[in-house]
Amino acid sequence: MPDLRYLEIPSLKSSIDTLQNLEFLLVKNGMYIPAYLLNMPKLRHLHVGSPKYPARFSKNCDSSQINSLQTLSFVFIFDSEDEEILRCSPNLRSLKCKSSFYHCPDLNFLTQLESLKMKHDSSFRGSYSRLNFPRNIKKLTLSEFALPREIMSLIGSLPNLEILKLEYAFEGEVWNTKDDEFQKLKFLKLNNLKFEQWNSSSDHFPVLERLVLRYCEKLKIIPSEFSKIPTLQMIEVYQCGEDVDNSALQIHEEQLEYGNEEFKVIITKATRYSFLE
């Protein structure tokens, strides 16, 4: 047992801290992350709790002792004290978390972070001015945010972002993307966004490969400039308006005219399914 490197258990036991060679730990029903877990010298990957019931850091966690974590999920960032505890994980590359209804986290200090999945409390009514992301981020998933346009521009400016998924995460009727935004983005998924107008140029998503729209029922059309993105391979539309469906079909026709014979469109309604290639 002392040489055990992988462990999956239903709940935490204090005897775990004797497993000094443990590298991967999955606790299915964990509600708290005790200090001894963060202090285990070789622990790289820690999964505690669930997306619905994220785990809290114990109050006796030492915010000054550096740990070896590279992956952490699912953790509840309740306040600035929890942020300070996260600072003990400078090598963190993947984080799944939930933030509280009155706290908006600034995670810019996690300079090695490449993947972030964060759900916010939908009752939050404060300012998003603190919200910040590490510049190294490649994959970003945000849900239950009411992001203003300036934060969307902040996301667009992330230099290494390749995958972006937004769910219930935008406030406003119009989304205007700008030059030099989303320059490396390959995958964009928009789920239940309530915006009506999307103004964008092909230069704003120059290497986009796949666009997924789900339940964007107020959106009028997909920007016609998407027909000029040479890397685009697929558009998926699920339960959006008829005009969005038609704009996807129009982009399909123009992509074929430009010689992109691999381009596909998938349109799904509750009662029908269409596939074009």
Image (cartoon, grey):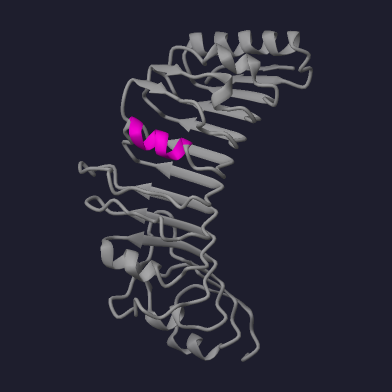
Q: Give the percent coordinates (x, y) of residue 160.
A: 57, 45
Location of residue 90 with respect to 235 vertically, above or below: below
Q: Nearer the viewer, residue 105 or 37?
A: 105
Assign the N terminus to one quadrant of the image. Answer: bottom right
Query: Measured along the vertical axis of the image, is residue 197 above or below residue 61?
Result: above
**In the depicted structure, whether residue 96 falls above or below residue 206:** below
In the drawing, does residue 10 fall left or right of residue 100? Answer: right
Taking the spot 32% from the left edge, 66% from the top edge, the residue there is: 82
Residue 154 belongs to magenta span: yes
Whether residue 272 is visible: no
Q: Residue at x 52, y 16 (%)?
A: 222
* Total numbered circles: 0
Which x, y percent locates residue 161?
55, 42
Q: Is any part of residue 202 visible from this angle? A: yes
Q: Is residue 107 inside the magenta stretch?
A: no
> Mostly what secondary structure, the magenta segment?
helix
Could you tell me residue 61's position as x and y percent?
34, 78
Task: Please state the horizontal and vertical placement of residue 6, each as a whole percent of the image.
Answer: 62, 76
| Magenta-colored span | 149-156
Q: Residue at x 63, y 12 (%)?
A: 251
Which residue lies at the image location 49% right of the left edge and 50% below the top edge? 135
Q: Is residue 183 above or below residue 9?
A: above
Horizontally, residue 118 falls left or right of residue 115, namely: left
Question: Residue 47 versus residue 133: which sits nearer the camera?
Answer: 133
- Please state, as top left, top right, bottom left or bottom right, where the C terminus lies in the image: top right
